[in-house]
């Protein structure tokens, strides 16, 4: 049984990528004897931080509380930058990191989502920080890392990583930075559980489309990163006893336009703006989650307002030109996907539209590569749509060569717990025993 588990979340890796990935040396080395779940059903919305909360806990987004990437502020919904759900304490369920720590194992995370402030359960923590954390603090980025929970034991590694790759959340430098840190942590501390999250594949899908020309380049680069992790295990003398899991969080869909439904809510008297076009008040507001969106009401308990907005949205969905094909009530998303929260409705895109939050016309716009939600490829859509994420497990704890066509992302954390010999009693998912050695 493996004493070390390295989990690499290759953001937005999909089944269709594996044919090419197998031709690359380090993917091949891991995949050669791996067991693979080819298509994994993710959670709704299919956004990075909600999905990672599910990967860490085995619970759907309504239970983890991570219902979007960015936190909706009902008192100031247009304030930017909107903070992200990114603290470990934002997750309302038990995580694999907590379970491992309780069992006395050593834990590490390098730029893994939702780990800020997680120093009590993560022994070697390099928190994943978006650019806004450094606003006005550009002269003292190490202090920002320290404040966000970076472990004393890794501060010199972070410092060296920044000297090579900078600190900005830009690809592929941020990916190279985190893999550098993860590799040094492996060499120096040999943690029992290490989580890391290179996102260059996702970044190139946003920029060039689902199967755009940038994706292979990103896979090439990711292969080099896997090589760095493998080399670190070999240097540390733990390669033979290390289990690797390569997983991903969501696929992408190609989009051709960005629609801002708030413009139509304003037309219908549900949003008020001042002479500058800035928000004054709202009764209903659409908060974008890429290819889906949540609708917030100022008075969610007001049955009349609820009905008025629902009927308007249903009429718009039926007309078919406003970018969304379905309107879910909160009760429906809870029943179908375990998604609930302080919103009232969810709009599901039509498969080629992403949602914006503009209040002024034009209500329909083109790409904006400056925002991940509005690239040529995006996500946030219902988990059934588009290319699907994968799960690849290799090492002494796993069976060799078992292929499972379909699975659930809620099984990831219980599977990790089983391999580590730790307990995650609150998870909704179950270990995938078919790929684990007895
Ligand atoms: Zn992602």
Image (cartoon, rainbow, N blue to C red):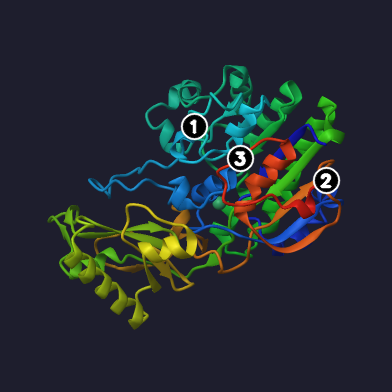
Q: Is residue 34 above or below residue 349?
A: above
- Name the residue beneath numbered marker 2: 438
Label 2, ligand 1: CB separation under 8 Å: no
Secondary structure under badge 3? loop
Quarter of the picture holding the N terminus: top right
Residue 68 visible to an observer of this rendering: no
Q: Residue furthest left?
A: 275
Number of other residues with Cα within 10 Å of mark 2, as a class: few under 14, some 14 to 19, many 20 or more: few
Residue at the image position 76 percent from the left and 56 percent from the top: 36
Q: In the rendered structure, are the residues bearing label 2 and label 3 in contact, judged by CB atoms less than 8 Å apart?
A: no
**Nearer the N terminus, badge 3 or badge 1?**
1
Number of other residues with Cα within 10 Å of mark 1, as a class: few under 14, some 14 to 19, many 20 or more: many
Percent position of residue 222, x then y: 70, 47
Residue 385 visible to an observer of this rendering: yes
Quarter of the picture holding the C terminus: top right
Q: How far separated are the C-alphas under marks 2 and 1?
A: 35 Å
In this rendering, would 255 be left or right of 3? Answer: left
- Name the residue beneath numbered marker 3: 424
Determine the image quadrant of residue 296: bottom left
Percent position of residue 42, x then y: 57, 58
Q: Which mark is residue 116?
A: 1
Q: How far separated are the C-alphas under marks 2 and 3?
A: 19 Å
Percent position of residue 369, x then y: 47, 56
- In the depicted view, which residue is nearer to us: 93 or 361? 93
Number of other residues with Cα within 10 Å of mark 3, as a class: few under 14, some 14 to 19, many 20 or more: many
Determine the image quadrant of residue 12: bottom right
């Amino acid at each position: 049984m493996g004493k070390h588990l390295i989990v690499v979340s290759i953001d937005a890796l999909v089944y269709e990528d594996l044919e090419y990935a197998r031709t690359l040396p380090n993917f091949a080395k891991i995949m050669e004897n791996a067991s693979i779940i080819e298509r994994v059903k993710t959670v709704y919305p299919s956004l990075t931080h909600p999905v990672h909360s599910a990967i860490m806990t085995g619970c759907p987004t309504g239970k983890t509380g991570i219902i979007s990437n960015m936190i909706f502020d009902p008192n100031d919904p247009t304030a930017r930058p909107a903070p992200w759900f990114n603290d470990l304490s934002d997750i309302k369920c038990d995580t694999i990191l907590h379970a491992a720590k309780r069992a006395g194992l050593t834990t590490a995370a390098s730029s893994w989502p939702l780990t800020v402030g997680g120093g009590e359960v993560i022994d070697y923590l390099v928190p994943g920080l978006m650019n806004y954390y450094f606003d006005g603090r550009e002269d003292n980025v190490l202090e920002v890392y320290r404040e966000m929970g970076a472990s004393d034991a890794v501060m010199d590694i972070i410092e060296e990583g920044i000297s090579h790759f900078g600190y900005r959340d830009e690809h592929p430098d941020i990916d190279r930075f985190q893999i550098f840190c993860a590799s040094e942590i492996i060499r120096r501390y040999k943690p029992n559980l290490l989580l890391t999250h290179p996102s260059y594949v996702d970044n190139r899908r946003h920029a060039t489309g689902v199967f755009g020309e940038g994706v292979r380049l990103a896979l090439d680069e990711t292969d080099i990163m896997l090589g760095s992790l493998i080399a670190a295990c070999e240097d540390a003398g733990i390669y033979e006893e290390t289990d690797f899991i390569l997983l991903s969080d969501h696929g992408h869909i190609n989009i051709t336009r960005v629609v801002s439904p708030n413009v139509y809510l304003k037309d219908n008297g549900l949003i008020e703006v001042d002479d500058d076009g800035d928000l004054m008040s709202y009764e209903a507001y659409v908060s974008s989650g890429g290819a889906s969106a949540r609708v917030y009401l100022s008075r969610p308990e007001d049955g009349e307002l609820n009905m008025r907005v629902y009927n308007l949205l249903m009429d718009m969905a039926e007309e078919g030109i406003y970018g969304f094909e379905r309107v879910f009530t909160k009760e429906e998303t809870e029943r179908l996907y375990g998604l609930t929260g302080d919103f009232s409705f969810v709009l599901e895109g039509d498969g080629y539209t992403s949602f914006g939050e503009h209040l002024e016309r034009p209500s329909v716009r083109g790409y904006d590569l400056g925002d991940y939600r509005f690239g040529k490829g995006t996500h946030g859509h219902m988990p059934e749509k588009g290319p699907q994420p994968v799960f690849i497990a290799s090492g002494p704890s796993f069976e060799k060569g078992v292929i499972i066509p379909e699975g659930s992302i809620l099984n990831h954390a219980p599977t990790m717990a089983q391999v580590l010999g730790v307990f995650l009693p609150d998870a909704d998912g179950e270990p995938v025993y078919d790929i684990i050695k007895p």
